[in-house]
Amino acid sequence: MYDVIIVGGGPAGSTLARKLSVQGLKVLLIEKHTIPRYKACGGGITPRCYKLLDLDISEYIEDITYKIDFKFPNDKTTVLETEKPIIYQVDRTKFDKYLIDKANESGCEIHDGETVFDFYNNDKEVVVMTDKGEYETRILVGADGINSTVAYKANLLNGKKGIALESEIYVDNSDIERLNGEVVVDFNAIKYGYGWVFPKKDRLSIGVGTFLNKASEIKKSLSKMIDENVVGDIEERKIYGHQLSFPDGRNGTFNTDKIMLIGDATRLADPFTGEGIYNALLTANISFDVIKKHFNGKCELDEYTFRLNREVVPDVGWAYRLAQFTYNNMDFIEKSVKFFPNVLAYFIDIMMGDNNYINYKLKVPLYALHIIRSKTKMKVESDMKRS
């Protein structure tokens, strides 16, 4: 009998597993892929996300972003440059393995290469069935991503889904060096979404993502992104498709009396940027608090849903409204940035963890008019033709 079984070995699952194991609980983490495994993701960690990590990940940072090139549909570019890091680039294969290894070192039992296909309640516990056996647990946690088996089986599906296509491009060192310290965010790349270029130690992560649930020309959009951002010869390319969480800010249900969802299984990734790791870690931390209190007889698991709807969902809801406006009015956004460049300071403060999306309609004009100034010094150059 386990105290907690966690399905899924991403940042949310491994973080919760480590924290619970440190408390002396008997924890099993089941990951369907063999570790290490590739995770389709840009691999960008914002400072607000970095602050949630209680581990030293400096060894796994492959590049630090100080500059963002925003490309707009009118063939213009706005370049934002800061004095502080705004994104830490990691290789998700190495990063995720490190988090799982730390969970294992803390006493968590790890079963990788094992697939959960069903579970059922058996009086006071949940029986989890996998392709290799059955296990009993007091609490089952679904950390198994946007297409969570646990969420589906427990009837806890929330939110919507978008799609993304990403390519790992192995190129000449000159291409990587050219982009060291900066990223490209291209709003012209795909409808209701954007394209990105993130440099890593030995390659470029280039992708396109949309919050629409289908995009017939997404392969063409990715090819265009690659053509526009790779100067030298391509030595190797690997293409991966994956789905995006698309929450709409409405209150959800994220637990039953014995089951909880964390990470992308909640579908609470940032609906404006698509960033998922921050809320993955946030839900892991909140679930840890609730589980600890629950085992001490101080609350029921329903406190978890209550806390997410109070602490996470409202900000996601405002981000959703901002995304709806932004991606449907990109020409207006480009002009606003051109004439009121300080508006970008608002988004930098969100990435830094110094602000949030709540009441953005009030905050954005205050930033634009310099009534509110960012704690992070930045320089913006607009009306630059694409190179």
Image (tube, rainbow, N blue to C red):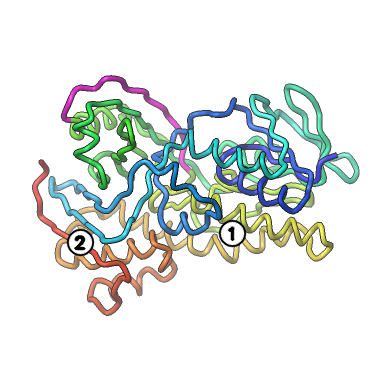
User: What residue range appears in magenta?
Assistant: 231-244
Q: Nearer the viewer, residue 76 or 331?
A: 76
Q: Which residue is mark 1?
A: 251
Q: Nearer the viewer, residue 161 or 7?
A: 7
Question: Is any part of residue 211 visible from this angle?
Answer: no
Tell me the element at label 1: loop
Q: Residues within 10 Å of mark 2 (few under 14, many from 20)?
A: some
In space, the residues marked 1 and 2 are separated at their CA atoms by 32 Å
> The N terminus appears in which quarter of the rendering?
top right
- In this image, 136 relative to 377: left or right? right
Which mark's residue is nearer the viewer, 1 or 2?
2
* Residue 149 place in picture, x, y as percent: 65, 35
Q: Which residue is mark 2?
A: 337
Q: Looking at the picture, which amino acid does disc 1 mark? A: Asn
- In this image, 43 relative to 341: left or right? right
Residue 385 colored in magenta in the image: no
Residue at image coords 69%, 34%: 110
